Each structure stands twice: as structure tokens, then as C-alpha cells.
Amino acid sequence: MSAALDTIAEARAALRAIAELLKAGGAAPYLGPAVAVAAPGPRTPEALAAFFGAKVALPRRAKGNVWAAAQHIESYKHRNTVTALMNEAFAAPVPPAPLHSALAALKLPLIVESWYDDAMRAALAGRDNWGEVQGITRAGIGEDRWFRFYDSTGAAATAEQAAGWTTLLYRPHGGVTPARNYLISDADYVEVLTEIDIQTPIPDEVRHRRAGRSFVFIGCRFHDQMLRSYARQIMKRSGAKHYALLPEGELTRNESRFLAEQGIVPVGLPFGDAMSELLSCL
């Protein structure tokens, strides 16, 4: 069971420990959209659903649910329409936040980015010997593939090349750069979630690099079953203790239960203060 670090002293001590873990390569950051402060474009699944709703008339059941909204658009218009709307939503480059840049400088073995923008990739751009692997939709590609690798220039790469990179950026939901891959519709996730329990959609190199490491969730929420399912499977066979710097807002009952079940310790400081404190320790 996890317990929140409620006192300021406990929280600061935990943030110092997290920083030491990161600097030693013993933890993998798992970044959510809230890390990029005041960034352009939608910053939550609900905001992205509202963006879709402003572009396409949605039935009541799809309003507010980004995956159902994307599925409706895909079913009644075309997958290309979904992709075009995602391209539009994330067209503006997102400048790296100070924490993105600090993490890029650490040369971590594994970084997980759970949103669609390009902030973490941009932070890594000045470095060498890194690349990324993205989840991809299998809609219409005619291939039995769950993900694709890209090197630091954005060129297609192989799993063999990825094994030699110092840092692997894992974007399980895809991203606007370098190739506009998006897992976004219900159909995308049904395919993945039917296999994710046996880990097939998770690249072997990610599985190798997570072994024995803690995860540090920064700017993520887990108020949706799909988000919890992904995090649970990405964490599988990693370290025993994890931490979370959570965005503002009261946790749902399911979120609290998920954190406790997975041994994720929430750091009990306001999100902006926790990010600043962590940054000062790196």
C-alpha cells in the first residue's frame, strides 16, 4: 500500500530521493501533459475531446470522452479526418519545460512520454545517441506491428539500433513528431488492450530498460481506466516503489485505489511547487 507524503518535510525528502534515483539512472520518468506549463494545444484528454467537439458534431455519448469522440469521427467520416484533426490540435511546437530539459541532460536509460506533443523530443534534440519508440495505430497499415522506432533525426530505425542508444524515449500513445502516429480511437485501444496483458504491444527494449527501476509519474492523471491499464502494464516487472507528482485536482476513488495497488507514493506538495523542488535537486 502507498501512503501520501503529506508533510512538507516528508515531501521534500522524497523529492531529494527521487532526484538521486534519477541521477543514478535508477528511475524512469513517466511524463503527463501537465509537465508542459502554459503550452499551446489541448493539455488533457477532456480538452482534446472538446477540440474534437468544436470541429465535428458529436453524439452525447461521445462528448467529453476523447477516445469515443475519435471513434465516432473515424466511423462516420474517415480515419484520415481523425489524423488531420490531431495534426491540427498539436501543430504548434511545444517548447520544453525546464524539467524536460533537466531530464534530457541526465542521459536516462528510459523516459516515458504519455501525451502527443513534441516537448520531450525537442528537449533531447541537442543530444546524441538517443531515439524513440512509438505506439502506432494498426488501422489501415496492413502490417502486424504495434510500434515503430525512430532515431534522433526522425528517421526510421530498428530495434537493434535502439538497443545501443543511451536514452530511449517511449511514447506509447504515439505523437505528432516525427511521423504523426496516434493511438486515439476506441478501436485503436481495443486492439492494444486485448494484447497488452501478455505485453506484446510493449517493445522488448522498453521491457529490458524498466527492469528493476522505479517510475516517477509527473503530471499524469489516472481517472480513466485506459490510462490506468497502460500505466499498469508499462510498470510490470519494474521496481517495487514508485512516486507521483500529481496535477492539481481531487483524486477519484479509482485513482486512489490504483496508486495504492501499484505502490505509487504521491508527493504531497502542490504540483508546481513539487516540480520546482525536484528541478532544484537535479
Image (cartoon, rainbow, N blue to C red):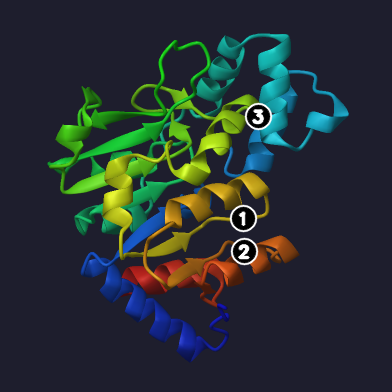
- Local SS, label 3: helix
Q: Is residue 41 visible?
A: no
Task: Determine the secondary structure under disc 1.
Answer: loop
How far from the left and from the top, in percent, is residue 198? Answer: 47, 43
Q: Do residues under tags 2 and 1 come within 8 Å of each other at their CB atoms? A: yes
Measured from the top left, where is residue 226 in percent x and y?
Answer: 62, 44
Q: Earlier in the sequence, mark 2 or mark 1?
A: 1
- Badge 1 amino acid: Phe
Residue drawn at point x = 21 percent, y = 69 percent = 24
Where does label 1 land, which residue? 222
Q: CA distance from mark 2 to mark 3?
A: 22 Å
**Secondary structure at numbered mark 2:** helix
The residue lying at 30 percent from left, 39 percent from top is 122
Q: Residue at x 84, y 24 (%)?
A: 59
**Contact (Cβ within 8 Å) of mark 3 with mark 1:** no
Q: Is residue 10 visible?
A: yes
Based on the displayed image, in which of its 4 quarters is residue 148 positioned? top left
Q: Residues within 10 Å of mark 1 (few under 14, many from 20)?
A: some
Residue kind at label 3, given as amino acid type: Asp
Mark 2 near mark 3, Cβ–Cβ under 8 Å?
Answer: no
Query: Label 2 belongs to which residue?
Result: 258
Task: Count neighbours of disc 2 (C-alpha within 10 A) and say few if under 14, some if 14 to 19, many if 20 or more.
Answer: many
Q: Quadrant of the N terminus?
A: bottom right
Name the residue carrying label 3. Answer: 186
